Amino acid sequence: MTSTQPLVSILIPAYNCQDWIADTLRSASAQTWPHKEIIVVDDGSTDQTLAVAQRFASRDITVVTQKNQGAAAARNKAFSLSRGEYIQWLDADDFLSATKIARQMTAMSESPDKLRLLSSGWAHFLYRPRLAAFKPTSLWCDLTQAEWLIRKMAENLHMQTATWLVSRELTEKAGPWDTRLLGDDDGEYFCRVLLASNGVRFVPGPSVYYRAAGTGSLSYIAASRRKVEAHFLSMKMHIDYLHSVERSRRANEACVRYLNNWAIYFYPEHIDVFEQMRDLAESLGGKLDVPALSWKYAWIRSLFGWKAAKRFQIMAPALRWNLTRRFDKFMAQREGPIAVEKLP
């Protein structure tokens, strides 16, 4: 270990991930950047997550547990325990390429600015990370604060949590994770990090392997009133964040597209929230449309109504997704253990 190099803290919130946490910890340990610490906060798991993580406890790997409070609270706890000059967030079922942190730290040393936010490439996988396809978006480049937010909101894009590498100064300037948000807490959090930064520097190359959770996104929010209200709060905060750095026609247009992109999450189950979104769109000089369903389900709408058609639109891809997951899991079991240390 080279003590003269900056210490990087890899912070991992964990909840009921007994099948994944070991490989995630191997991935973190395999980072070629030598001066690192790894902190796992078990958020009151009811399975064997804590026991599995504790097998890895060492001088460089700290494992603690707390009463279940949610991912945001677990991340705040992990940061409070960390000592690193730079922070690497990592979910407990994802992987990092072995050189991810080293490449980003090299980029930082070439142009030192601790208020510069570093990002990197990422891709989905199910059970076999070698099949992950890294497909660049318009966020995969150096960007100003305003340009990053406009592209994210207008094009319905995001950067996965682990893509970022953040200095401690920037992390403290942004403030803690918002424990009120039951979903999209990472989206809201990194908006604040971005606003506290001097812009984004993108470091090319495969870096983050993100385990896709499922296709239930359309039903995930609508099923819970608390999640609906929390997500709409996050959306309003996104709009305020963008307006804090740019008030322009293009910024307003991006906000209206953002509202339209997400309207289907709320309509028709939570029509009161949809109406609030419509009023917000009009205040921005735009219009919120009734969400459109795929043409394949138009006949269901005509016979049984909008809600039934929406349910079918959710169920069909969910069925295909489950079949795909089962096949990929079967193939992964045949191929044997994942060599996370060799991920490019």
Image (cartoon, helix red, strand yellow):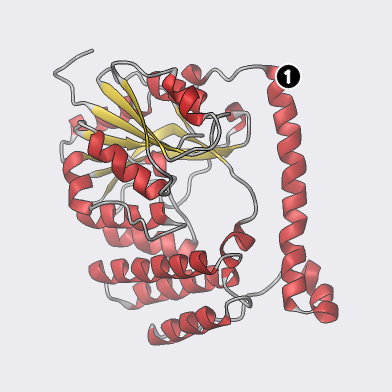
Q: 67 left or right of 19?
A: left
Relative vertical location of residue 48 with respect to residue 257 in this rendering, above or below = above
Residue lying farthest to the top in this orientation: 1
Vertical order, 113 against 279 (above or below): above
Q: Looking at the image, can residue 344 be seen?
A: no
Q: Position of residue 117 (x, y in %)?
A: 26, 45
In the foreground, 250 or 3: 3
Q: Residue at x 70, y 71 (%)?
A: 293
For mark 1, does the 10 Å Cα neighbourhood hold few (<14), some (14 to 19), or many (20 or more) residues? few
Vertical side of 101 occupied by 247: above or below: below
Horizontal side of residue 278 vs 314, given as left or right? left
Asked whether, in this view, residue 139 is left or right of residue 79, the answer is right
Residue 74: give x, y in percent of width and height.
Answer: 36, 43
Name the residue rendered at 82%, 81% in the picture: 302
Q: Which amino acid does label 1 sit on?
A: Arg
Q: Is residue 208 visible?
A: yes
**Looking at the picture, does residue 265 appear above or below residue 45?**
below
Q: Quadrant of residue 152?
A: bottom left
x%, y% of residue 235? 41, 68
Residue under label 1, please give it: 334
- Image x and y of residue 25, in percent: 44, 24
Q: Which of 269 and 310 is in front in this view?
A: 269
